[in-house]
Amino acid sequence: MSTPFPTVSAVAPRTAPAAPAAKKAAPVRPTRAPLLSQPRVQRILYPLLVGVVLIALWQGLVTGLELPPYLVPSPWLMLQTLVTDWAALGASLWVTIKITLLAFVAATVAGVLISFLFVQSKRIETALFPYAVLLQVTPIVAVAPLIIIWVKDPTASMVICAALVALFPIISNTTLGLRSVEPDLQSYFQLNRATRLQTLVRLRIPSALPYFFGGLRISSGLALIGAVVAEFVAGTGGSGAGLAYQILQAGFQLNIPRMFAALLLISLTGVAMFVLMAWLSRVALGSWHASES
């Protein structure tokens, strides 16, 4: 007697072995770049390394060739002179910084106001912009004696001379930025019947900020140059003397280390002003503009 085939229901299903519970993957922590490979550190480290190499070469050449101090002083002697003559050099540095800052502020305010005037009418810009170029190309050395004669106060005359040197980059860059507006956004403002003041404040000024801060970087250095040139022309001495007078006096006395120390202070002041303008630009534009990202 043959045995019947078992039915499907009679066959016990084979259960597959339970898969082991998957372990939770640990969160991947972003690997932090080494300190020396970070861009901010490189911006500071690389120029410092180049400066150290140049100063070492300078010191080595002066020492090896036994150059006299009245010809080329060594960096060490220049630093010693800076420390010993700091009473006179520090006071002159403050005078030069004061003239530079006043001229820079005056040039910024005047340049922005002139740019606002230019952007209101193309005819006004066409009629007046050549005179702004004329101020830029005229040597301040030729104009400074007249300004010093016309303006009785020596400090005010030097501020005017330095402001004239620093004025054109503010006018040129700000005017360019105020006109560099996207046509679609300008059409949108016109479609909504925005007034000139609303268009200026909400559209043109934000678009002009990168150009404006670029002009500030240039004008900060030009204001310092204008202040030093004005001091050379004015030739004021005494308590109101700037670093230019210290350079002239050191040249007459063949005190070359003191001359180099004054030049070092001027250079450091220019670098500090440029770094300050770059920091202000990063603070104002870093969160929304691609130029500071």
Image: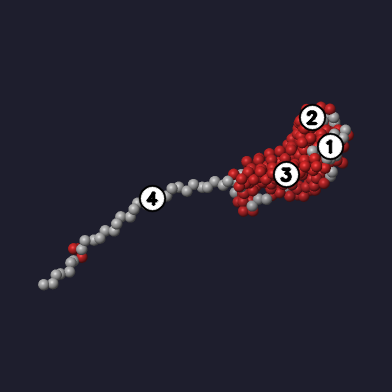
Give the mark nearest the N terminus, 2 or 4.
4
Question: Which is nearer the N-term, disc 3 or disc 1?
Answer: 3
Badge 3 density bin: few <14, some 14–19, many ≥20, Cα 10 Å: few
| Residue of label 1 | 69
In x, y percent, where is residue 106? 75, 37
Judge whether residue 290 can be spotted in this image.
yes
Residue at 78% x, 47% y is 129
Q: Does the CB distance between marks 4 and 1 fall below 8 Å?
A: no
Residue 286 as seen in the image, left or right of residue 251: left
Identity, as a three-letter code, of the amino acid under mark 2: Asp
**Which circle, 2 or 3, is nearer the viewer?**
3
- The x and y percentages for residue 247 are 83, 35
Q: CA distance from mark 3 to mark 1?
A: 21 Å
Q: Alpha carbon of mark 2 to alpha carbon of mark 3: how far?
A: 26 Å
Nearest-to-viewer mark from 4 and 1: 1
Q: What kind of residue is marked 4?
A: Lys
Q: Which comes before the other along the chain, label 4 or label 1?
A: 4
Callout 4: helix, strand or loop?
loop
The span from disc 4 to disc 1 (Cα, nearest Å) is 75 Å
Checking the image for residue 85, the label placed there is 2
For the residue pair 189 and 208, the one nearer the viewer reads as 208
Q: Earlier in the sequence, mark 2 or mark 1?
A: 1
Q: Which residue is mark 4?
A: 23
Disc 2 to disc 1: CB gap under 8 Å:
no
Q: Which residue is mark 3?
A: 53
The residue positioned 72% from the left and 44% from the top of the image is 53
**Mark 3 or mark 4: whose residue is earlier in sequence:** 4
Q: Residue furthest bottom?
A: 1
Q: Amino acid at mark 1?
A: Pro
Q: How many marks?
A: 4
